[in-house]
Image (cartoon, rainbow, N blue to C red):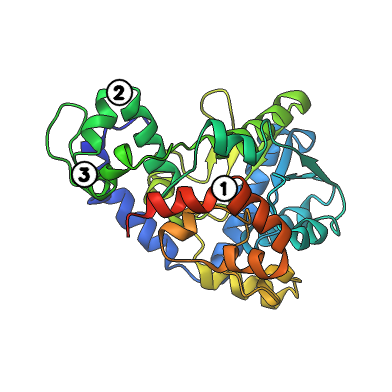
Amino acid sequence: MAEMNDAEIIAELKREPAAELRRLQKKPYEWKVEHALDVIREFVEHEGENGVYVSFSGGKDSLVLLHLVRSIYPDVPAVFANTGMEFPEQVKFVRTFPNVTEVYPIKHFPKILKEDGIVFPSKEVAMYIKAAKGGATYAVNGLKGLDKDGKGNRYKARFKKWAYLMDCGVKISPDCFELMKERPMRDYEKMNGKSPIIGTRAEESFRRAVGWMKSGCNSFAGNRAKSTPLSLWVESDVLRYIDENGIKLSPMYTDGGMKRTGCMFCPVPIAHGDYKNIEYARVRHPKLYETIMIKHGLKAMLDKAKND
């Protein structure tokens, strides 16, 4: 499918692809399991069993994904992006799984804070803020709720509330994702000649829904093939699969009460009022909390960016 512009994306969401996505998301659980297995088989047959890996974080979705993949291809490796800011409990949990390779950040978090800034309130908004500061017209317009041609855009209207971040006194950047996770994974792919199987779901974000509409669950276009077998699943499907297959969850869920795993000091949840990761780090890992939040200034940066 050809690349869509913003207006076309909005139009598409109102027509067939969005309706089809909603229809498939309502399919029975049993159908989704078989569909995911078919997606995996198609991808592995195309790329070769030695040409794929599972992107693995130890979170609920990636646990289900790894179980599905290894139920039919038990020797497929997994790769864990150990950013250095993962909870120690999560790293220990991931290391209980066989055949998992760890990759490490291009640049560590304290240096990113100093040189690149924070990702806030989301990766997408941070991309617009950084691009707008660099003078990119599409980004400047986007933060005004306009498309690249300066016309009103319903999709971009949601960015207007974050335009104040341009002058909040804090560097805003999506670079931590790139430097701590994305580039290390891409480097692994290039070095080993492998393509990723990823546990993302379309219901998680607008962009992921649009991604499914563009390429479906398997994408072989461009220079990087990728597979997202859980695209059509919803949260209840994930939880049911975990329960029915007796999958052991990370202590971050069972003991920490987290809804998602991830970096201890990720600013994104805080932008949406979720302080569980930060509070858990403060109580369970006070030295790390003091180092990142106080010594390296993350707390002060967040206080400025939140604009309460």
Residue with the mark numbered 1: 228
Question: Residue 265: image x %, image y %?
Answer: 59, 54
Instruction: Tell me which residue sits at (67%, 37%) in the image.
Output: 108
Which amino acid, by three-letter code, is at mark 2? Answer: Ala
Q: Is residue 305 left or right of residue 155?
A: right
Question: Residue 103: image x %, image y %?
Answer: 76, 38
Residue with the mark numbered 3: 11
Q: Earlier in the sequence, mark 1 or mark 3?
A: 3
Residue with the mark numbered 2: 136
Nearer the viewer's eye, disc 3 or disc 2?
Answer: 2
Nearer the viewer's eye, disc 1 or disc 2?
Answer: 2
Dot 3, crowdedness within 10 Å: few (<14), some or many (≥20)?
A: few
Q: Which mark is residue 21?
A: none
Q: How many marks?
A: 3
Q: Quadrant of the N terminus?
A: top left
Q: Is residue 135 left or right of residue 75?
A: left
Q: Earlier in the sequence, mark 3 or mark 2?
A: 3
Label 3: which secondary element:
helix
